[in-house]
Image: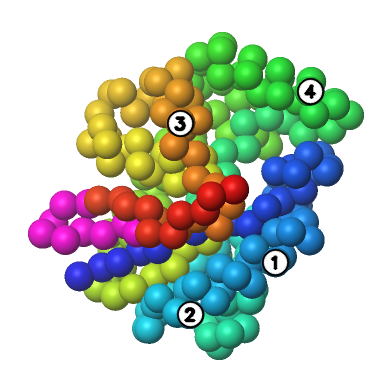
Amino acid sequence: MKKIYLVRHAQSESNARLAIRPNSLINLTKVGKVEALELSDWLCEHLSHIDGVFISHYVRTAQTAEPYLMATGQTASVIEALHEFDYLDFERIKDLSFEDLVATAEAFWQQGDTAYQDGTASDSFEHFVGRVCQVRQMFDELPDGTYVVFTHGMWIGMLMWQILHDDGLRTMDMAAFRAYELAIRPKNCEVFLLSDACGVQTVAKVRVRDE
């Protein structure tokens, strides 16, 4: 049997509205670093044996994983396609206020074009869907065991959305996904268990945060 624990990173500068940086370079806050330590304690208490740890190449997942890696002596492997949906061009948003940034993000979702790319370094919705499918295939190819994956809130939401709709056409419905993702968005350092018992994939929240 395979168990994959999906962890949303700890509080980041953008979560706390402290800074606008290129998505890959957003750091944890002081609060986030405390959350990462508490998460490490929880993982060490609940998981007795780990067969692998994965992170995205974004700084905030590496910083979230660091206390757990130090506590267990594990080394994390980077999965490039595991990163968050980076749908806004940093050069276009870097000087915006957070209020204007929120409005710009909402405009992206309202335009509804799954192939639209805000900039050459940004994702289209189609590409994001494909990236999550790519990582799911990699997960399928892992041997049975227990794994911890430090990733991002919208990425977890897309994985759940794909499982919910069995990868059907509704997966590409931007408006429907946006409404779903906002309703179920994981809190920082919440943990979800992806398992394949009896050949059926399920996702269940196993660490709940009340913040």
Q: Quadrant of residue 10?
A: bottom right
Q: Earlier in the sequence, mark 1 or mark 4?
A: 1
For the residue carrying disc 4, how many other residues have a C-alpha within 10 Å: few (<14), some (14-19), or many (20+)? few
Q: Identify the secondary structure beneath mark 4.
A: helix
Q: What residue lies at 50% left-to-right and 72% top-to-bottom?
A: 42
x then y, percent, for residue 151: 53, 55
Left/right placement of residue 12 relative to residue 80 reads: right
Please name whichever residue, 96 or 118, is drawn nearer the observer in this view of the structure: 96
- Please say if 101 is above or below 39: above
Most extreme residue toward the front is: 210
Q: Which residue is mark 1?
A: 34
What whole-number distance in Å separates the C-alpha atoms at marks 2 and 3? Answer: 29 Å
Q: Label 3 sits on what residue type? A: Ala
Please name whichever residue, 39 or 201, is drawn nearer the observer in this view of the structure: 39
Residue 62 makes an appearance in the image: no
For the residue carrying disc 1, how many other residues have a C-alpha within 10 Å: few (<14), some (14-19), or many (20+)? some
Residue 196 makes an appearance in the image: yes
Part of the protein shown in magenta: 193-201
Q: Earlier in the sequence, mark 3 or mark 1?
A: 1
Q: Earlier in the sequence, mark 3 or mark 4?
A: 4
What whole-number distance in Å separates the C-alpha atoms at marks 1 and 4? Answer: 27 Å
What whole-number distance in Å separates the C-alpha atoms at marks 1 and 2? Answer: 16 Å
For the residue carrying disc 3, how many other residues have a C-alpha within 10 Å: few (<14), some (14-19), or many (20+)? few
Q: Which residue is mark 4?
A: 99
